[in-house]
Amino acid sequence: MANLRGIFIILPAAAMVAICLFSDPLVALAEKDEDMLFIKYHIHITNDTPDDMPFRAPNVYLHCKSKNKDVGNRKIAWHEDYHWDTKINYFRTTLFFCYVWWKSKERYFEAFKATRDEERCRYYHNSCLWSVREDGIYFSNNNATWRNVYPW
């Protein structure tokens, strides 16, 4: 009878040791993937068109949407920032695209694409920063270095 009591004490302890030894890397990996799904990303689009017009710079107009969410038509005044938040879906297919027009120029662009932006936009407060300028649409993930990704 004493031997059975020892087995009932040793087996649960051995199971706990095995769980601690072998599951930590798997748990850490699962937590990392799970964390990526719960991060809220901030997409910002700013009107940085030139201010050399007689009265003021013309507004930038845009319409952004995804498969499941339409953020609607927006009119963005000079130096105004329009933004919204999103999370990445389980399959990492989250995509927001925008149609932008300014004066006689117009363009479609991908404002957020999960497979492209889940890492690069985490650098600066989980933000994807876009700037509409005279020669195109610029991207930055640090608010210091800008690249013309979508020329007009």
Image (cartoon, rainbow, N blue to C red):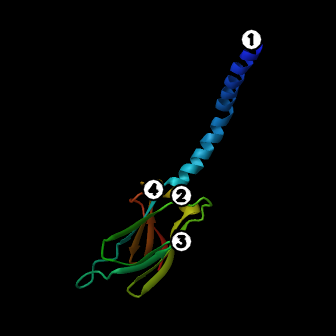
Tags 4 and 1 touching, CB below 8 Å: no
Viewer-proximal residue among 67 and 105: 67
**Separation of residues labelled 2 and 3 (CA atoms):** 19 Å
Query: In the rendered structure, which amino acid carries the disc numbered 1?
Result: Ala
Q: Label 3 is placed on what type of residue? A: Asn
Disc 3 from disc 1: Cα separation: 64 Å
Q: Which mark is residue 118?
A: 2
* Residue behind mark 3: 68
Nearer to us of marks 2 and 3 is: 3
Q: Position of residue 77 (x, y in %)?
A: 31, 77
Give the number of callouts: 4
CB under 8 Å between discs 2 and 1: no
For residue 48, which quarter of the picture?
Answer: bottom left
Neighbours of disc 4 within 10 Å: few (<14), some (14-19), many (20+): many
Which mark's residue is nearer the viewer, 3 or 1? 1
Disc 4 marks which residue? 126
CA gap, disc 4 and disc 1 = 59 Å
Mark 2 or mark 1, earlier in chain: 1
Which amino acid type is shown beneath numbered disc 4? Asn
30 relative to 107 in the view: left or right: right
Q: Position of residue 88 (x, y in %)?
A: 54, 60
**Quadrant of image for the N terminus:** top right
> Where is residue 11, by image quadrant?
top right
Give the CA distance from mark 2 to mark 4: 8 Å
To which residue does mark 1 refer?
Answer: 2
**Which residue is depicted at the point 66% across and 28% down?**
16
Residue 72 appears in view = yes
Q: Earlier in the sequence, mark 4 or mark 1?
A: 1
In the rendered image of this protein, does residue 58 appear above or below residue 41?
A: below
- Mark 2, secondary structure of its residue: helix
Task: Specify few, some or many for label 2: CA neighbours under 10 Å numbering under 14, 14-19, or 20 or more.
Answer: many
